[in-house]
Amino acid sequence: MDEKEKIEAKRTVAFLGPPATFSHMACIQHFGDSARMLPENTIQDVFEAVEREKTDYGVVPVENSTEGPVSLTLDSFIPSEVKICAEIMTRISHDLLSLSGVAGEVQKIYSHPQALSQCREWLRKNFPRVRLEETASTAKAAKLASEDPQAAAIASSLAAPLYGLKAVASQIEDHLNNGTRFLVLGRHGAGRTGRDKISVLFIIPHAPGTLFRVLQVFYEKGINLTKIESRPNKGKPWEYVFFIDFEGHATDPHVAQALDQVKERVLFVKLLGSYPQCPQESSSKRTG
């Protein structure tokens, strides 16, 4: 049984809720409609659901092609022992939803900060004087809009029938190639497929050339880095945690050698997971 079959066999998945968030849509895309999906209030709650074995898997957003990394997800990896076992690339398209579907009745717009940012220019041109209010999720925004005839929400098209809303406008994102990468969390890594990706975090000494010395290892081993991010190491001012993604699997001999060399050059390193690469083309598929 390969990793994909193992994932589908369990079908108990935590996601950032409530229902009809883009995380929920990513779950449906990856696990199918038959999976038992449990909404959680925060990204950290999704991590904890997997760690405490409340669910077998969790799905969290990690980066958006327009707005960049999701800091809460990166920060949650630092203390957590969950493993990344898959990634999901999904096209993100936003609708403006309200009870009436009439633009002239909209006096406030709710949405998640990322969604508001992804529609910033469209909002400036079409609703320059309307108050914008942040919510914990796009689905929460839809719920609030369903309770107020003068409010609207930026959310997924899936939210419209679920919360009894109508579209004021569709595809309002500023960039039509807007996509989000989600990670599937589990308690075990994925097996080797031959087209894999690895995620690692590490902390380096605060000294000249230390980051260069780490990256030099990957260059010398011919390993292609696909991403690098940094986050503050909370509790230790001006110290940073680096996150990198690169091609390969932890069981590949040259990758194992590289990780051994990295351990000698950093203060701390953690393998977050090896998992199959998701084809970039899938990010262009429309999921609603």
Image: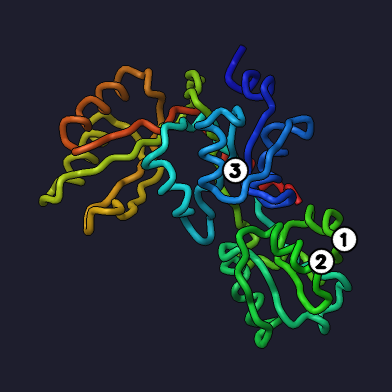
Bin the neighbour count of mark 2 within 10 Å (Cα to Cα): few under 14, some 14-19, many 20 and up.
many
Q: Residue furthest bottom?
A: 129
Nearer-N-terminus badge (1/2): 2
The crowding category of the residue bearing disc 3, from other C-alpha atoms within 10 Å (few below 14, some 14 to 19, many at least 20), is many
> Residue at label 3?
89
Mark 2 is on which residue type? Ser
Kindly report the distance in space between the C-alpha atoms of the residues bearing marks 3 and 1. 28 Å
Mark yes or no: residue 210 visible.
Answer: yes
Specify how the rendered protein is coloured. rainbow
Which residue is labeled 1 in the image? 164
**Residue 239's x, y, as percent?**
22, 53
Image disc number at residue 266 = none
The image's mark for residue 146 is 2
Nearest to N terminus: mark 3 or mark 2: 3
Q: Name the secondary structure under disc 1.
A: loop
Residue 284, image x and y in percent?
A: 65, 48
Mark closer to the observer (3, 1) = 1
